[in-house]
């Protein structure tokens, strides 16, 4: 290990972090829980759980409506969380930060508003072969509705985008590029900045699915220069059911509203309704106030530890895990990109991932098995499913060792 | 490890590695596809009836050890049985893997070899794997056109 790497890992106290996550103390089937399903959802620190409880115990009221004390307080906390989210992704303005249910809703919002306004018959949308279903199906629905066409950027055997093929797909008909920042099934980190630069050279906007990136890397939407960036709170230690859609102001202003209802209007008559300003235009109805406050607490918690430090620690852990499982006979890693984050997908001889998952579960180890909502990726690698261990900042090398022992047990059962 | 061994009994492992009646039947008069969307299991069941009797039943596809062994042993068990008997066996099998068969030991006798799946009842999320082939068989016998899923 280099001196620099040592300094970084020394600065990250994983045991202290673990102590902040009450769920990690439990046993599963009599064994200490080893939670390696973080790409599905992460666990929540005490700070998040407490922020939600505090809100319901002392602040609960509807926001942006009443003049009374509680409403004012709730509104203040809700908007403070927006400012936290803005800072977290370095958005130029908090008016560009829209609260949604999660990454999926953020993408659907863009498909239903930007998409319906700008995509017409004969137009093309570019996605990649490593997208999650949530960054495929909304675009398919839009294409069906509009008579537009979905074009797919292929990936190589390591699970990296083939950039030259991407460049070839861009043309005068391309109206939007949609790409994941980090692949949930392979762990690949995509060169989003280069992807955006290429598209912008032709005047094409880019949407980035940030669900798997936000917990692991510093995301700076201004540096990426992407036009939309969508992520979920629950994958970055926040509550489920809340997420963020970032969009560039000029685009958001030109887009029609997503849903109609309260809070998204300035004036309603039966003849004509005037919509509220950003970001409220896209936040119809009473939002998940507690969720937003919980998300704010989660992002503050991550900021407090330092996302760069977290990323460096996780990278070291992934390298350790990759080296350790590579020694297991018959194990094949799916997704060996040069730039990876958080995810270790694998197959083991002819043993079905579901059987691997059951046997590991009895050892207290939680992994995901299946197609990971990325069936095109599975097809690309000629498998129906994989076993996937995915890491978070609270995982340890001891847990990786437990995983390796668990996989050895799988081989024993199927020997 | 004991409950794991209850689930992954040698007979089950053996069938999953060398499934019986694993073949297409071009002459099948009933056929259905079954999916387990959760894990990507996917089987096609082929049936040839002689009146009401299952003359031949086979399967193809991919899945976990439990689903594959279940399909394999189902095809072995059902050859020569009537549709009504197959239906009854499925009910008994379903009770077995969901842990509802207790106290009715006598009635399990007709399950015969299929009793090796009793360990599944300790693994509720795996019930779908054990029953996928049976659900698909039902769909085939009922002549349903659409692919069935366990969800």
Image (cartoon, grey):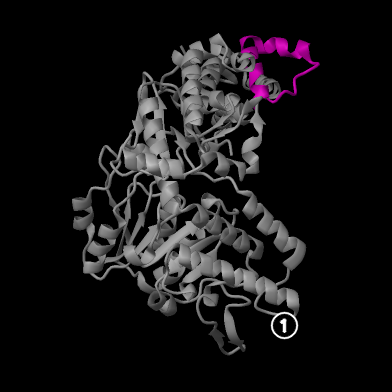
- Quadrant of res A223: bottom left
Estimate the x, y position of residue A173 in percent, counting from the top left: 25, 66
Is the residue A401 above or below the residue A126 in the image?
A: above
Q: Percent x, y for residue B144?
A: 55, 37
Q: Label 1's element?
A: loop
Q: Position of residue A9 (x, y in %)?
A: 42, 41
Q: Which residue is painted at 58% across and 75% down in the image?
A: A260
Q: Is residue A30 left or right of residue A117?
A: right
Q: Can the viewer see residue B31? A: no
Q: Could you tell me if residue A327 is visible in this image?
A: yes
Is B87 drawn above or below residue A277 in the view shown? above
Residue closest to the far right? B103
Q: Where is mark 1, residue-wise? A: A67
Given residues A144 and A194, the one toward you in this image is: A194
Q: Quadrant of the N terminus of chain A?
A: top left
Q: Is residue A321 left or right of residue A367?
A: left
Chain for disc number 1: A
Question: Is B114 covered by the magenta stretch?
Answer: yes
Judged left or right of residue B77, residue A94 is left
Residue shown at 62% from the left, 89% from the top: A269
């Amino acid at each position: 290990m280099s001196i620099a790497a040592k300094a970084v890992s020394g600065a990250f106290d994983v045991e202290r972090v673990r102590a902040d996550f009450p769920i990690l103390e439990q046993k599963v089937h009599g064994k200490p829980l080893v939670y390696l399903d973080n790409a599905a959802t992460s666990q929540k620190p005490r700070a998040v759980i407490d922020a939600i409880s505090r809100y319901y115990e002392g602040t609960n009221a509807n926001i942006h409506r009443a003049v009374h004390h509680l409403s004012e307080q709730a509104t203040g906390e809700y908007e403070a969380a927006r400012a936290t989210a803005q800072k977290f992704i370095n958005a130029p303005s908090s008016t560009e930060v829209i609260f949604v249910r999660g990454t999926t809703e953020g993408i659907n919002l863009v498909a239903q508003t930007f998409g319906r306004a700008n995509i017409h018959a004969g137009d093309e949308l570019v996605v990649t072969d490593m997208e999650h279903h949530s960054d495929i199906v909304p675009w398919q629905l839009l294409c069906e509705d509009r008579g537009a066409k979905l074009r797919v950027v292929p990936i190589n055997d390591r699970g990296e985008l083939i950039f030259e093929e991407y460049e070839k797909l861009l043309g005068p008909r391309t109206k939007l590029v949609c790409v994941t920042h980090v692949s949930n099934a392979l762990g690949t980190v995509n060169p989003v900045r280069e992807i955006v630069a290429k598209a912008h050279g032709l005047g094409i906007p880019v949407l980035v699915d940030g669900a798997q990136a936000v917990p692991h890397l510093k995301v700076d939407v201004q540096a990426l220069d992407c036009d939309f960036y969508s992520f979920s709170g629950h994958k970055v230690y926040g509550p489920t059911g809340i997420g963020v859609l970032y969009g560039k102001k000029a685009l958001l202003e030109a887009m029609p509203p997503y849903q109609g209802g309260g809070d998204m209007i300035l004036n309603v008559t039966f003849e004509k309704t005037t919509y509220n300003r950003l970001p409220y235009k896209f936040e119809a109805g009473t939002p998940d106030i507690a969720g937003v406050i919980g998300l704010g607490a989660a992002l503050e918690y991550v900021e407090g530890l330092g996302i760069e430090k977290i990323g460096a620690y996780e990278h070291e852990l992934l390298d350790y895990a990759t080296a350790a499982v590579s020694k297991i006979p018959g194990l094949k890693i799916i997704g060996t990109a040069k730039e990876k984050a958080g995810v270790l997908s694998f197959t083991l001889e002819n043993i079905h991932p579901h059987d691997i998952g059951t046997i590991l579960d009895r050892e207290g180890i939680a992994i995901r098995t299946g197609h990971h909502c990325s069936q095109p990726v599975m097809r690309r690698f000629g498998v129906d499913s994989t076993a996937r261990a995915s890491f978070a900042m609270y995982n340890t090398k001891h847990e990786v060792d437990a995983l390796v022992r668990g996989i050895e047990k799988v081989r024993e059962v199927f020997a | 490890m004991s409950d794991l061994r209850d689930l992954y009994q040698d007979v089950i492992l053996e069938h999953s590695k060398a499934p019986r009646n694993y073949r297409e039947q071009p002459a099948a008069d009933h056929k259905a596809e079954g999916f387990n969307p959760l894990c990507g299991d996917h089987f096609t069941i082929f049936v040839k009836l002689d009146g009401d009797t299952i003359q031949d039943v086979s399967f193809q596809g991919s899945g976990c050890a439990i689903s594959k062994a279940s399909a394999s042993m189902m095809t072995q068990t059902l050859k020569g049985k009537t549709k009504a008997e197959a239906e009854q066996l499925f009910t008994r099998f379903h009770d077995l893997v969901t842990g509802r068969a207790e106290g009715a030991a006598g009635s399990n006798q007709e399950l015969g070899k299929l009793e090796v799946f009793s360990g599944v009842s300790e693994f509720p999320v795996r019930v779908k794997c054990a029953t996928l082939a049976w659900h698909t068989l039902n769909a085939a016998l009922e002549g349903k056109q659409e692919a069935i899923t366990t969800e």
